[in-house]
Amino acid sequence: MKVNHMSAQSATQSTKLPASCAMRSAENHQASYEAAIGETPANATITPTYETETGYDTDESKHLARLLVSFTKYWARGRTLKILFQKNPPAILTAPIVEAAKKWLPRINLKFEFVTDGTSDIRIGFNEHLNWSSVGTDALLAKQNEPTMEFNVKELYSAELSPLPELTRIVLHEFGHALGAVHEHQHPQANIPWNEPLLRSLLLQTGLSDEEINTNFFDRYEAADFHYSAYDRDSVMHFDVPNGLTLGDFEIINVGKTLSPKDIEVMSSIYPDRTNSKFDTP
């Protein structure tokens, strides 16, 4: 497995990159498929088979073609996800994350159980450079001693370890990935006019490969990957789009601060029947 690294702090002083976030993707496509279908056969129900315009040798056609998949990576409905903070960090670090993550729960048919030992589905670590998460059931491919999500402590906490304003947004975003969601700015209806040469050059300076840049910015997913929902520029899964990184006078800023109505609607349709769950509401 690999981490698609991205740092918002590595751009030039005059141009800030949109986010310090990455989706973690399984290198073994077959293993990813088997994990998803093993979790729930419903992950195989995307139809029809995707078609893309690959007959034209353009950047757009390449980006449209690259991310085609025939399955989703959602967890089984009614599932209890066991979540472990690695290396037993203090409650001053974990409690705000737990509180923010649980904002996903009231309308979805899943439960989070935060454990301190034993086997787990999601394992959280900390670093000082990047927020990232595996997407949905890809977390099942990691070894039990490997993290499936990490948070950059410098973006979540002050020097005195007080939660920073961005903590809730970042936690909701990464847990969105953990629930199977992808980046909203890569929705087929988004049509963001990125200044691709500029953005690519800045991202390459952070150590990303071209493939990783495409995966997190330029490739487009199909509508099925968004549960056939319309594009939502207010989604917590959307990056800010600074004017300085686009063509023309285009920007989308101050978005994704919390769950949007569409975020709640879509995730509720992916994990429905909360009231019929055998689990108690947290």
Image: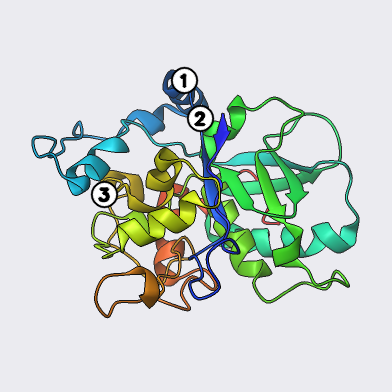
Q: Amino acid at mark 1?
A: Glu
Select label 2 or label 3 by which is in front: 2
Could you tell which of marks 2 and 3 lies nearer the N-terminus?
2
Q: From where the camera sits, is residue 241 visible?
A: yes
> Measured from the top left, where is residue 160 in percent x and y?
88, 73
CA separation in Å, label 2 and label 3: 21 Å
CA separation in Å, label 2 and label 1: 12 Å
Q: Secondary structure at mark 2?
A: loop
Q: Which mark is residue 167?
A: none
Q: Between residues 239 and 57, which one lies in front from this camera angle?
A: 57
CA separation in Å, label 1 and label 3: 22 Å
Q: From where the camera sits, is residue 184 visible?
A: no
Q: Which mark is residue 26?
A: 2
Select label 2 or label 1 by which is in front: 2
> Measured from the top left, where is residue 185 in percent x and y?
36, 60
Picture residue at 56% right of the left edge, 28% below the top: 1
Q: Secondary structure at mark 1?
A: helix
Q: Secondary structure at mark 3?
A: helix
Residue highlighted by disc 1:
34
Residue highlighted by disc 3:
223
* Quadrant position of residue 8: bottom right
Is the residue marked by circle 1 packed among few (<14), some (14-19), or many (20+) residues within 10 Å?
Answer: some
Picture residue at 58% right of the left edge, 61% below the top: 10
> Measured from the top left, where is residue 67 in percent x and y?
32, 38
Q: Between residues 149 and 246, which one lies in front from this camera angle?
A: 246
